[in-house]
Amino acid sequence: AQYTIGYLVGSLATGSINRKLAKALARLAPPDLALEEIPIRDLPLYSYDYDADFPPAARTFKQALDAADAVLLVTPEYNRSIPGGLKNAIDWASRPFGHNSFTHKPAAIIGASPGEIRSAIAQQHLRAILAACDCPLMTAPEAYIHFTPGLISDNGDVTDPRCEHFLRRFMQSYGQFVARMAKLRPAKG
Ligand code: FNR
């Protein structure tokens, strides 16, 4: 694969529908994208007291983000926003000052919910947060997945062909966005 996509799952739940969605996206992505989860579960709660010396879990997290060509955020909506665990991970990623892991990291957002609002409000909040983090974000297509029972299996099989087609197209668009952003990226060093 040409590009590694690190993905963050906003949910820590064992039966997370958003993790199922992430697995489906990994399977449906075009061959030039390799998706790998960057876990957020072991991060302590962020404080700038850590900025002088990040703990091992935060170092591992930031190294994984820095090594990825792009970052995909797959998130549920909790109380009309993103889950606290995901916000915490983003705060770690953005610091210490001057070492923001989101700078020049092409991102995309997707989320699933069993509710009719389909994570849309959380995704709007997440767009604002990532904009504050100077993160280049794919603006279209948007993807609000209405999760019905059995829509996606634990290992990422999508049972509805229309949903499968939509997710495949979403990942194709994201791959094109990542390639476009790679051309604009300043040389390292
Ligand atoms: C929810 N849920 C929810 N759904 C939604 O569409 N809008 C919301 O604001 C909320 N709020 C909310 C708060 C809390 C604390 C929980 C636990 C749940 C329902 C949510 O979409 C559902 O539990 C999904 O299964 C969450 O996705 P994961 O965690 O399974 O990936």
Image (cartoon, grey):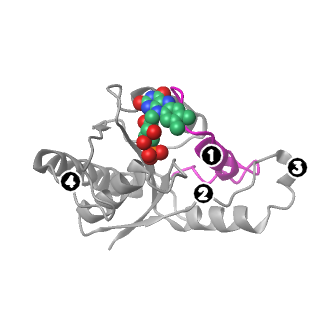
Q: Which residues are magenta?
A: 77-104
Give the amino acid at mark 1: Gly
Q: Nearer the viewer, mark 1 or mark 3?
A: 1
Residue at which label 3 appears: 49
Residue 40: mark: 2
How far is the residue under mark 2 from the one under mark 3? 19 Å
The verdict on residue 170 being magenta is: no
Residue 4 visible to an observer of this rendering: yes
How far is the residue under mark 1 from the one under mark 3? 19 Å
Q: Secondary structure at mark 1?
A: helix
Question: Which of the marked residues, 1 or 4, is nearer the chain's N terminus?
Answer: 1
Asked if 154 appears above or below 130 in the picture, the reply is below
- From the viewer's side, name the closer residue of 134 and 92: 92
Asked if 145 appears above or below 178 in the picture, the reply is above
Q: Secondary structure at mark 3?
A: helix
Q: Quadrant of residue 156?
A: bottom left
Give the amino acid at mark 2: Ile
Residue at which label 1 appears: 85
Q: Nearer the viewer, mark 2 or mark 3?
A: 2
Q: Position of residue 20 (x, y in %)?
A: 36, 56
* 86 left or right of 3 in image: right
* 106 left or right of 86 in image: left
Residue 52: mark: none
Residue at which label 4 appears: 168
